Amino acid sequence: MNGESLPQTSRIPLYEGSTQFRHWRFSPEQLAETRSLLNAAAVAVIRDAFESDQPGSSSQVSFLSAEEENLLVKLYLGKIPQLCGIFRFPEEVEATAMSYLKRFYLKNTVMDWHPKNVMLTVVFLATKTTNYPIPLDAYASRIPKTTPGDVLDLEFLVAQSLGFDFTIWHAHRALWGLWLDIQTLSDIPLDDLSKAYDGALTSIRASRFTDAEFIYTPSQIALACLSIASPALASAWLRSKSGQGSDDAISAMLEPLKAMVLSQGSLPDVEAVREVDRRLRLCKNPEKIPGTNAYNKKVAEKQRKAEEKRLRKAELQRKAMEDGDPFGSTLTAQADLDDDDDDE
Amino acid sequence: MDAVERANAEHQKRWAKDQKVGEGTYAVVYRGREVATGRKVAIKKIKVGLFKDGLDMSAIREVKYLRELKHQNVIELLDVFSSKTNLNLVLEFLETDLELVIRDRSLVFLPADIKAWTAMAFRGLEFCHRNWILHRDLKPNNLLISANGHLKLADFGLARDFADPGYKMTHQVITRWYRPPELLFGARHYSTAVDIWSVGCIFAELMLRTPYLPGESDMDQVRTTFRALGTPTEEDWPGHKKLPDYFDAGQYPKTQLRDLFTAASTECLNLLSRCLIYDPYKRISAKEALFHPYFSAMPYPTHPSKLPKPAKKGSTMPLEEFDGNVDFEGSGPGVRANPPNKLKRKLSSDELGSRPIARRLDFSQHS
Ligand SMILES: Nc1ncnc2c1ncn2[C@@H]1O[C@H](COP(=O)(O)OP(=O)(O)OP(=O)(O)O)[C@@H](O)[C@H]1O
Ligand SMILES: [Mg+2]
């Protein structure tokens, strides 16, 4: 499905050069496959970690499936608007954070990183990327049982997982453009218009719980949501843009999208998620849990590597002295390049 | 190692740092190269650990916008990776910047050169604005120049998007000398016109070879601006007296740009004056500017590869007399033109002699 099949508003061609278009669009099949491969790889790694923690221990563990992971993510997607409400963050922050959370779990598993933690970090990061920054202390202090460190520890991981693609093209913005455009059509009663807008916005908020943004363009989502609220307005607009005939094809294309928003655009059943969360406690990656053998082993390994590197540098320095370069000028310059970077 | 960490390590391995080349307020910049091809790059290392609020806003803005913008006249962000507590931006390597070019008294600018730089600045800016991005820190030092002479907008640490017109923005942006009057008066709603004013100041500076409106404080900036362009009336700029930080800076008479920029063509001055209109709504847009007759009139803009550029540090550039077209003595900051004949390069034989040599030296140093 493609932006070209829709009448273009002025932002569309630019959208096609965006990181969202280039890196974060999938067919439904690709999306399912991405998640199931990710899940399988995660299970394999965690199984090994269990074994290294305590041989034989992985056989009794019931790992989460990709669908179960997704269910849990969805539950925490629902908590983002609540969190943003506490701070009265604008819709931009909320929508951006939700996109970040969904993108994060196309690269990570909930068995490594629990969404209840990641959620706090994506919201904080979104305040910054949308230009509504607040001090970390002010943020963390209003969230129960949360320290600034809890938020910050995952920030780098989140940014990396997003591939540093911070810009999100939102459907609610596209809806705004659509709405302005519709007002220029003749014979549209203004009353209907604002009711339709509110209805469409409600659907757009619902669409954030779905995979719509990975599959469709923001303007497709906006139009589908308008069409849910007011089919008449949506087709009047379509007719005005594309002339007779071609709007049928577009309407048909929008149907599965509308169905997706209507059927999946709500929070999952809490009981079902509670069960998933309970099992998650038993299949979390022990390497990520301080105190376990696997965690300690991993930390020790990292320290060993750092120490090796330090020794290597010291050795170079010593050689330089012997080679009659007592100030080690060439090498200090070299060492300066990767001072505290861990290049390995 | 997690998949995400592994992917990051893959990115990191593509690039090697060679030598520190500069230091900004929040970053250290290295010359480096792409390991596979040897392509020269700049690696900007931002120490994230320094900031108690995590990734800082300048770094976030720079990454956010450069990730989306791909244009001949905008610096290219090739990659981003992290190393421990640092964020590394891999940028195309750019040899010099417009400030160094302007300050280099051994260089003489032809009108066609000025046209070329101005056109490239507008092209880059038009692309940003078309993408709903305000740069908000345009100045010669942030217009970098590649080895083959292309000018590129860089330093997006203050940029923001403006898709949401109702939103209030800070007026504490843009380096003072390039800051438009609406920001000096504290406007919280502003748009693309702020960048246009900056380009106007840069355009003037290219002709004067010294900053056009070098105010000594924010207050003095207003006076300097009015002294150069005349105090605006209510009719020139409706509503400006109601801006939050408005103050009466005194009455200065209207001036003719022609008196100062004696060597400039009519089209040139027309474009300049339209960049420096007080009322932001009447100021020219980047797109209109690109269609301005100045750019289609003779002389055609100089080809980027033929533009003057400073000799490389350390290279032995054949000495020219240091009498470019700027008079550094004298009073009245930037309000004096150079005799028209000085806007020409001294001797065409100099031009033919020195530039190819400078380029040859470039090659020997960096091949
Ligand atoms: N793409 C690049 N290619 C080559 N050198 C560069 C590049 N970017 C930056 N530099 C060099 O590194 C220096 C520091 O750049 P940086 O953009 O971090 O800070 P700045 O613009 O000098 O200062 P500030 O942070 O105050 O804006 C520059 O002055 C320049 O010499
Ligand atoms: Mg700079």
Image (cartoon, coloured by chain):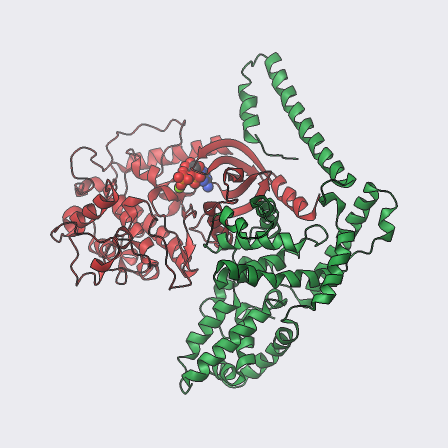
Chain colours: A green, B red
> Along the line of sight, which residue is nearer the eye, A150 or B109?
A150
Name the residue: 55% across, 37% down.
B33
Residue A236 image point, x, y percent = 48, 84
Asked where in the image residue A109 lies, by quadrant, the reply is bottom right
Residue B95 in view in this figure: no
The number of callouts visible is 0
Q: Is residue A133 above or below residue B237?
A: above
Q: Quadrant of the N terminus of chain B?
A: top right
Q: Tell which quarter ligand 2 is in.
A: top left
Name the residue: 63% across, 24% down.
A313
> Along the line of sight, which residue is nearer the eye, B351 or A159?
A159
Residue B351 image point, x, y percent = 31, 37
Left or right of residue A61, residue B353 in this image = left
Q: Residue furthest bottom?
A: A187
Asked where in the image residue B296 lies, by quadrant, the reply is bottom left
Name the residue: 55% across, 71% down.
A204
> Along the line of sight, which residue is nearer the eye, A108 or A288?
A288
Q: Is residue A50 above or below residue A320?
A: below
Residue B108 image point, x, y percent = 27, 38
Left or right of residue B256, residue A13 in this image = right
Residue B144 image point, x, y percent = 40, 43
Left or right of residue B353, residue A65 in this image = right
Q: Is residue A283 above or below residue A314?
A: below
Q: Is residue A1 above or below residue B357?
A: below
